[in-house]
Image (cartoon, rainbow, N blue to C red):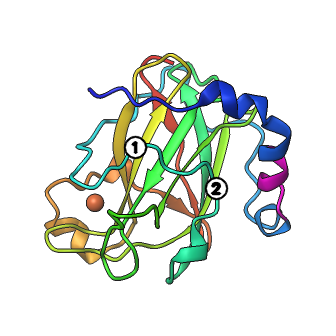
Amino acid sequence: MTQQTYPRRHIIGIGAGALAVLALPQLARGQQLPLTPQCDADAKATPPQTEGPFFKPRSPLRSDLRAELKGSPVLLTGFVLTRDCRPIANALVDLWHADADGDYDNRGFRGRGHQFTDAQGRYRFLTVKPARYTGRTAHYHVKVQAANGPVLTTQLYFPGEPANRRDGLYRPDLEMRFSGAADARFDFVLSRG
Ligand code: FE
């Protein structure tokens, strides 16, 4: 598995600035996560999936990907957890996905961004729903990594998509949970945090 290098130490160094960006009012209006993650004491690790052909390293540090994307907004939030349900602070969450036409930006970084979980182990992205493309149902690609841990590469799916049934990669346990049309929740459980 390819290990990606992210400027983690540098990011910590500019922590105050990064927090100011995350505290934008438009983010604050989103879904409030419960303080305690919902998981078992011996939770199943989030299953890995193929990276696919469109991953690009060194995505921008940002949680709002909508500036360059059209489409239905999605607020994707959740925790990064250990298998015994402990939140992991400062874990990397790197998201990339197709746009509303089913295209990836392979020249620039449209539809790509990474961030680190906060002190409570939470992440939050504002983005859009990707369109399905040939052979694939709608999905997000994600890499998740605790500091100095292995990279989990996986994909997230939308519930109720007719194309899920025709996509050989789709798995119901990688579906996001929606509360309302735009509020998506997925908690990642790392096999080794
Ligand atoms: Fe894809």
Residue 63 has which mark?
Answer: 2
Q: Amino acid at mark 2?
A: Ser
Q: At 47% from the left edge and 18% from the top edge, which residue is drawn?
A: 149
Residue 57 has which mark?
Answer: 1
Q: At 34% from the left edge and 43% from the top edge, which residue is drawn?
A: 154
Region rendered in magenta: 19-24
Q: Position of residue 39 (x, y in %)?
A: 57, 33
Q: Position of residue 106 (x, y in %)?
A: 32, 63
In reply to whether residue 33 is colored magenta, the answer given is no
Q: Position of residue 80 (x, y in %)?
A: 57, 34
Q: At 66% from the left edge and 24% from the top edge, which residue is drawn?
A: 9
Q: Position of residue 20 (x, y in %)?
A: 85, 51
Q: At 40% from the left edge and 80% from the top edge, which residue is drawn?
A: 100
Residue at the front extreme, as displayed: 107
Spatial separation of the CA atoms under disc 1 and disc 2 = 16 Å
Q: Please, what is the dominant secondary structure of the magenta stretch?
A: helix
Residue 155 lies left or right of residue 59; in this view the side is left
Is residue 66 or residue 83 the one in the foreground?
66
**Dot 2 alpha-carbon crowd within 10 angstroms: few under 14, some 14 to 19, many 20 or more:** many
Residue 22 has which mark?
Answer: none
| Residue 181 in sight from this viewpoint | no
Residue 180 lies left or right of residue 154; in this view the side is right
Q: Secondary structure at mark 2?
A: loop
